[in-house]
């Protein structure tokens, strides 16, 4: 798919995100907007998947696990836009009797979701398990995971990083949404992550840097580079520099929009900055 | 009248964890989907034989139980049946949130196998003697909780949970214990309690190591003129409510016995059923909301009131309460 076409999908996904969050006056727009290029680039260009067909075991296809489950709006929009379920269902987000729970779950059997996430730090371990299962099955496909940078403060992440390198889990590409923000402020203020590349290197991971995680070209190049580094005995991490709230100017670069919804006026502003490209749900 | 103990002859004592280890090895041979993980306790969990024979299906995760639970959840996604092995404390309390989200809520087919549960862990003391694990696991939707009574039953339970689709908590222990659960007379069926001794005066509902203590107590009670019915509840969740109700409707009172805190375990599970359908006097043999300490298993069971004399006394109290009701 052409970059221009992918960018158009991103614009529509951004509309979906702010409309979903506005529609229920709850949810997490900031991280969702920041990860839009990554998830659109992954699902529409890189991930070898079989949408709309969905099987839990995912044999013979690439798998994706969202570890920072609070950015469910972008995940749900991308799943719907790539054919896993009807776009109209996005309007049920966070509402009673919906398959689109506040944080993703398998309990409602939403196609495209293979693990519950929300409580942070667990998705890398799950991704490693799925990657080990692929090795057991002789399945040459890859496993992708996505994490927040604040999520790296969870100890389980470092347990998993150590294990993946020690066990040469080289069919795994973890991505860190490195936007420098978390709920209570910047990551630097809350609990400084320090020299992140040096830490991943010390843990024995291959590192791919994407300095402009909101540029589709950069994301696609980063994903390509990451895939080229798989199968060589080391797990791979993409350090994806993004801007929280990207694409909606008043939400950009601040932790203030981590988990609050726009009002009617703010919604209109956000939508005006992201004109409809595909049809709104 | 033949003695009750004579109906449960045993020639040897074995640890229940060895029943788990032996069955896991058999599963390695019979079920290629079974994989095993440990967090640096392969020896203590008796998983070394599996690790040696099926090295490619064995994962040594290191001292990282949270990671182990997540990896196990992920392995199910590729169609595997992971058995995790560590101490009961590190299988539950340390990783409650990982089990809750990645396994129970996500409905993953993980078998959480937990050794060294309860006071009978012994000398390591309270840090390792978890007495809350049954409660924590019972409270999780989708979770099945199994606590076998001896080596034979642990062996059978390990095989049975591999056939069951869904998350299971399997609790066993460290001490040598009488091997008395004849699997021909009392086969292990997941979710079905076994009535080991029939009686009409009082029901003794026990789980795990306390089943043997209940049989010992039934012998003493018979000498004192009370016919106790002994039920082995190896599956605490889902609870075999029918078996318990059928017995208590006959006897009119009950004693529950478990190597666990008095809160959250078998006793309260039985209370719930009785208060709904058959309110009856109940006495609780369980740890009195306290932590354990170092000591031998025998010393600890005595000190914390989990021995057969205490079951006998509780049964006599229950019978008295029934008569004055």
Image (tube, coloured by chain):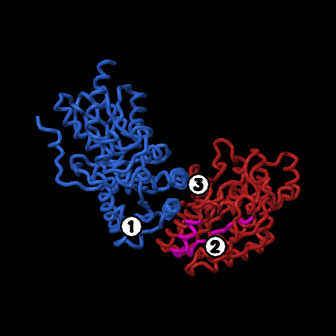
Chain colours: A red, B blue
CA separation in Å, label 2 and label 1? 35 Å
Mark 2 / mark 3, whichever is N-terminal: 3
Q: How far apart are marks 2 and 3 (CA)?
A: 26 Å
User: Is residue B171 positioned above or below A215 on the image?
Assistant: above
The verdict on a common chain for dots 2 and 1 is no
Q: What is the number of callouts on the image?
A: 3
* Residue B47, image quadrant: bottom left
Q: Mark 3 points at which residue?
A: A116
Q: Give the range drawn in magenta.
A: A158-179
Query: What residue is shown with label 2?
Result: A200
Q: Where is residue B158 in the image (x, y as percent from the top left)?
A: 34, 56
Above or below: residue B181 compared with residue B42: above
> Does residue B193 appear in the picture of this structure?
no
* Nearer to us in this view, B215 or A214: B215
Quarter of image, res B197: top left
Residue B179, given in percent of the width and then of the height, sits at 23, 52
Q: Mark 3 lies on which chain?
A: A
In the depicted structure, whether residue A171 falls above or below residue B288: below
Give the numbered dot on residue B193: none
Seen from the viewer's position, the closer of residues A163 and B81 is A163
Residue B217, given in percent of the width and then of the height, sits at: 23, 37
**Image quadrant in which you'd find residue B98:** bottom right
- Numbered circle sitting on residue B32: 1
Q: Are marks 2 and 1 in contact (CB under 8 Å)?
A: no
Give above or below for A212 relative to A188: below
């Amino acid at each position: 798919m052409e970059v221009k076409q992918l960018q158009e999908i991103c614009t529509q996904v951004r509309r979906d995100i702010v409309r979903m969050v506005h529609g229920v006056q709850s949810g997490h727009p900031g991280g969702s907007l920041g990860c839009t290029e990554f998830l659109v680039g992954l699902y529409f260009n890189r991930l070898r998947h079989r949408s709309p067909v969905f099987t839990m075991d995912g044999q013979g296809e690439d798998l994706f696990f969202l570890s920072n489950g609070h950015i469910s709006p972008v995940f749900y929009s991308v799943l719907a836009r790539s054919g896993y379920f009807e776009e109209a269902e996005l309007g049920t987000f966070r509402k009673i009797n919906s398959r689109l729970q506040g944080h993703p779950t398998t309990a409602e059997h939403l196609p495209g979701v293979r693990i519950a996430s929300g409580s942070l730090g667990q998705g890398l371990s799950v991704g490693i398990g799925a990657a080990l299962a692929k090795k057991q099955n002789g399945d040459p496909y890859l496993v992708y995971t996505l994490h927040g940078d604040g999520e790296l403060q969870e100890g389980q992440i470092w347990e998993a990083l150590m294990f993946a390198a020690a066990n040469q889990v080289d069919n795994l590409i973890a991505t860190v949404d490195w936007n420098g923000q978390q709920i209570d402020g910047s990551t630097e203020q809350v609990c400084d992550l320090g020299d992140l590349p040096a830490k991943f290197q010390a843990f024995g991971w291959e590192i791919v840097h994407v300095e402009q995680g909101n540029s589709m070209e950069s994301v696609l190049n980063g994903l390509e580079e990451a895939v080229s580094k798989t199968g060589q005995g080391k797990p791979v991490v993409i350090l994806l520099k993004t801007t929280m709230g990207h694409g909606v100017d008043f939400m950009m670069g601040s932790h203030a929009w981590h988990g609050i919804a726009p009002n009617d006026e703010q919604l209109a502003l956000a939508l005006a900055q992201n004109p409809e490209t595909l049809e709104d749900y | 009248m033949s003695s009750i103990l004579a109906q449960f002859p045993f020639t040897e004592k074995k640890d229940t964890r060895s029943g788990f280890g032996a069955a896991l090895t058999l599963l390695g041979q019979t079920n290629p989907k079974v994989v095993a993980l440990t967090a640096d306790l392969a020896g203590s969990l008796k998983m070394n034989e599996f690790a040696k024979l099926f090295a490619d299906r064995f994962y040594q995760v290191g001292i990282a139980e949270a990671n182990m639970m997540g990896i196990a959840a992920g392995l199910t996604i590729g169609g595997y049946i992971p058995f995790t092995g560590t101490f009961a404390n590190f299988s539950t309390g340390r990783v409650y949130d990982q089990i809750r989200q990645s396994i129970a809520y996500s409905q993953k087919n993980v078998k959480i196998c937990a050794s060294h549960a309860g006071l009978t862990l012994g000398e390591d003391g309270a840090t390792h003697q978890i007495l809350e694990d049954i409660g924590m696991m019972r409270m999780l939707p989708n979770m099945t909780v199994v606590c076998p009574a001896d080596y034979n039953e642990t062996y059978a339970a390990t095989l049975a949970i591999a056939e069951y689709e869904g998350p299971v908590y399997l609790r066993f222990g460290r001490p040598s214990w009488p091997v008395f659960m004849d699997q021909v007379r009392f086969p292990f069926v997941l979710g079905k309690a076994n009535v080991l001794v029939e009686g009409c005066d009082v029901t003794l509902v026990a789980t795990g190591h306390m089943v043997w203590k209940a049989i010992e107590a039934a012998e003493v009670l018979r000498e004192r003129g009370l016919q106790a019915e002994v039920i082995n509840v190896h599956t605490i969740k889902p609870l075999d409510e029918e078996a318990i109700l059928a017995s208590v409707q006959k006897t009119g009172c009950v004693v529950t016995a478990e190597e666990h805190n008095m809160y959250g375990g078998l006793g309260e599970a039985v209370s719930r059923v009785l208060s709904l359908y058959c309110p009856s006097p109940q006495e609780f043999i369980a740890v009195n909301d306290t932590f354990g300490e170092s000591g031998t298993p025998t010393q600890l069971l005595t000190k914390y009131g989990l021995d057969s004399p205490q079951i006998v006394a509780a049964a006599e109290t229950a019978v008295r309460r029934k008569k004055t009701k």
